[in-house]
Amino acid sequence: MSGFFTLKETESDKVVGRSQTCASCGLYKHAQHPKMEPTGDFQKEILIVTSAPNAADDRIGRYWSGGTGQFLKKTLAEWGFSLQESTLTTGSVLCIPLNEKGAYRMPNSHEIACCRSKLQTIIKQRKPKVIILLGEAALESVIGNEWREDVGAVNKWRGFTIPDQKLKAWVCPTYSPSFVKEADTQFLTAWKADLKQALGMVDVPFPNMGTPEKHVKILHDRREIKKALEEILAGPFPPDPALVSFDYETTGIKPHKMGHKLVSTSICASPEQAYSFLMPYQSKSCMRLWKEIMETDRFGKMAHNLKFEETWTGVMLGYPVRNWKWDSMQAAHILNNREGITGLKFQVYVNFGIEDYGSEVRPFLQSGDKDANAKNRIEELISTEAGKQKLLLYGGLDSLYEYWLAIKQMGMLGI
């Protein structure tokens, strides 16, 4: 059943340490139509990625040759789309996967990895406007190539229309039709809603997010820091909303244990500019300006999980943050209360199509200890100039994306 459980829960075959070739995969040996070519005329520039050719597909040499294909064809026709004419279909795996008894099974992670480059080539050559991912294997093949963490189940991703900046296409995950045919009505209803929304993205202009790193200015000199903070305090403040996002990088999750430090901070007062710098403890004027920013009522403050910044400001700096206006994590939960989707990296990807930008830094921000008061490895990271630059860029992007996300969320909630 592909649509609710992850491949890691149903399949133990691993990719690590194995070559990713057709010879390593071996599925072609037992396929009637190995390395199946895509099916469809692609008139609407919609690419459908399914798991793999099933028995009927492999026998005839075309995707959607059986009853599931008729089911999908009928569903697409409800909104005026032809499965054959409007779309192009390929698989996350291009040969039928069979078990030891010769029956169809879901492809495993190694097989998906072996075929991923072929799917990426199809996307590069055909340049679809919309990519619809049907089921777990399709999700792992496409989003798993962008996402550094565990992708998880389709239920986590379904319904999002992701403007993937690398693929230059709207990526729309949902359940596989074979799953919803046999599942409860609620899954069928959700699947149809997902498909309708995905098909509608054909006419939506694709947003080019540019190079976000250009909007982050890393400050090393205390005079630069002072000037930036003074400019933020001086305004002008956008009338709607007057908002400043900020983000801390620290030695741990909780600040109460002896030895913890507030290492760096970043701040963003417009969608075009974020600043990032090590906390300027040695400059009384800079620290005074930071305090004034935290305590002023002239503009609202925001963070992603503001409880973190509120706690660290109070414990480490000795004063509260005034005029909290927005928490983009709480807003994400209000907009969609599914589990596992409110983290900033996930929200940045599904809203702006920007892949996980923290993979190099994240290991240094984790302690590996169940104790919430344990220290992480951030000081090891900033012991080198290259590590310091990576941390400050990461922090600056956090503030920038939090600002972008807050503005979008406010629009979605009509605020």
Image (spheres, rainbow, N blue to C red):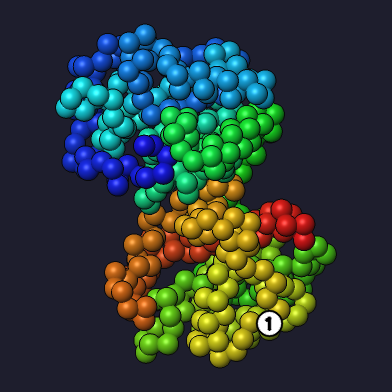
Q: Residue at x 38, y 37 (%)?
A: 2
Q: Residue at x 76, y 67 (%)?
A: 242
Q: Position of residue 294 (x, y in %)?
A: 65, 80
Q: Quadrant of residue 24?
A: top left
Question: In terms of secondary structure, where does tag 1 sit?
Answer: loop
Quarter holding the N terminus is top left
Identify the residue position indicated by label 1 in the image. 322
Q: Residue at x 37, y 78 (%)?
A: 372
| Left or right: 161 as drawn, with respect to 148 | right
Q: 413 and 71: which one is in front? A: 71
Q: Position of residue 271 (x, y in %)?
A: 68, 56
Q: Position of residue 229 (x, y in %)?
A: 66, 74
Mark 1: amino acid: Arg
Q: 16 and 273: which one is in front? A: 16
Q: Position of residue 360 (x, y in %)?
A: 37, 56
What count of labels does the image hold? Answer: 1
Q: Is residue 131 above or below residue 415?
A: above
Seen as rendered, the residue at the extreme right is 239
Q: Is residue 53 above or below residue 394?
A: above
Q: 372 and 77: which one is in front? A: 77
